[in-house]
Image (cartoon, grey):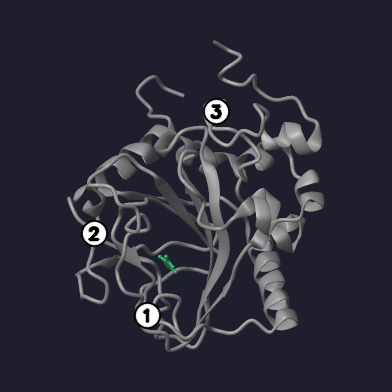
Amino acid sequence: MGTEEIDPVERHLAQIEERGYTIVPAVFDDDTASDLVDALDRIESERGILASDNSFEGRSTVRVYNLLAHGPRFEAIPVQPDILRIVEGVLDSGCLVSSLSSIAIGAGETAQPIHSDDQVLPLPKPHVATVCNTMWALTDFTEANGATRVIPGSHLWDHSPTYGVHYDSEPAEMHRGSVLVWHGSLWHGGGANRTADRRYGIAMNYCAGWIRQQENQQLGLALDTVAGFTPRLRELCGFSTYRQLIGHIEKQTPAQRFFDTAGPTSLFDAT
Ligand SMILES: O=C(O)CCC(=O)C(=O)O
């Protein structure tokens, strides 16, 4: 690498800082995308999962939540190294899996109201990143089929959008295999799908290690399932402590407590 070339992670981080989002191309291959789509279709039909009846989740959109409970194929997603390095740059290495779910926007779906993913937090804006979310494109994302719509630079604004109000936005179009990564304050929303086909995405969402995860990973996943995770995935699911303190159980991390693994010394004992 020439000395003037910028490390791709630094380039993506600079884009997130300036525009609030970035697109990482060619993160996964077509076989992986097809395998994930097939698995999601199977889960949906076996469990009889239907679209919800609200404007946020979408009345023609099917979401499967808590994907780490649905088999090992999903375990590679939170730890994908190229994406995780970017997320760690936005949050820090103590970040957590906030939620892992699929979003299949069906034919005829209308646009989701513009929102920011951190707007439920009672913090004055702009603020440090508390959330960093990603969308894995399992199909091409186009303006016509409901590509996520974004408002560049809005993560720097001093307020959150008003739910249901129209804001001008642009589609984050990307090829299957790409991943959109955004700062949790970015104003965005799923697009309308004017095609006959579904737009399949996986929403791999992260949060800072010092706020609550959106999906409760410690109670939502069976301990036997977590026992099979890599140490890093366990940490990301919250079987860790933030800065050797937040989330401890009698000065141990949950992983030390439940899986008898090595872990950091408690902050108290490090003093
Ligand atoms: O489906 C999308 O493209 C975005 C969905 C989204 O932003 C959400 O549900 O919070």
Asked if ligand 1 lies within 8 A of label 3, the reply is no
Tag of residue 160: 2
Secondary structure of the residue carrying numbered label 2 = loop
Secondary structure of the residue carrying numbered label 1 = loop
Q: Position of residue 109 (x, y in %)?
A: 42, 85
Q: Residue furthest top?
A: 271
CA–CA distance between discs 1 and 3?
44 Å
61 and 99: which is toward the camera: 99
38 and 187: which is toward the camera: 187
CA–CA distance between discs 1 and 2?
22 Å
The image quarter in which residue 152 lies = bottom left
Mark toward the start of the polypeptide (2 vs 3): 2
* Above or below 44: residue 242: above
Q: Nearer the viewer, mark 1 or mark 2?
A: 2
Ligand 1 occupies quarter: bottom left
Please report contact status of discs 1 and 2: CB closer than 8 Å, yes or no: no
Residue, x 21% and y 47% (percent of image)? 156
Residue, x 80% and y 37% (percent of image)? 259
Residue, x 28% and y 60% (percent of image)? 187
Q: Position of residue 113 (x, y in %)?
A: 31, 74
Q: Residue furthest left?
A: 158
Does residue 171 appear left or right of residue 168 in this picture? right
Please report contact status of discs 1 and 3: CB closer than 8 Å, yes or no: no
118 and 103: which is toward the camera: 118
**Residue 138 in view here:** no
Does residue 171 appear left or right of residue 60 in this picture? left
Mark toward the start of the polypeptide (1 vs 2): 2
Tag of residue 245: 3
Mark toward the start of the polypeptide (1 vs 3): 1
Q: Which residue is mark 1?
A: 192
Count neighbours of disc 2 (C-alpha within 10 A) and say few if under 14, some if 14 to 19, many if 20 or more: many
Q: Quadrant of the C terminus?
A: top right
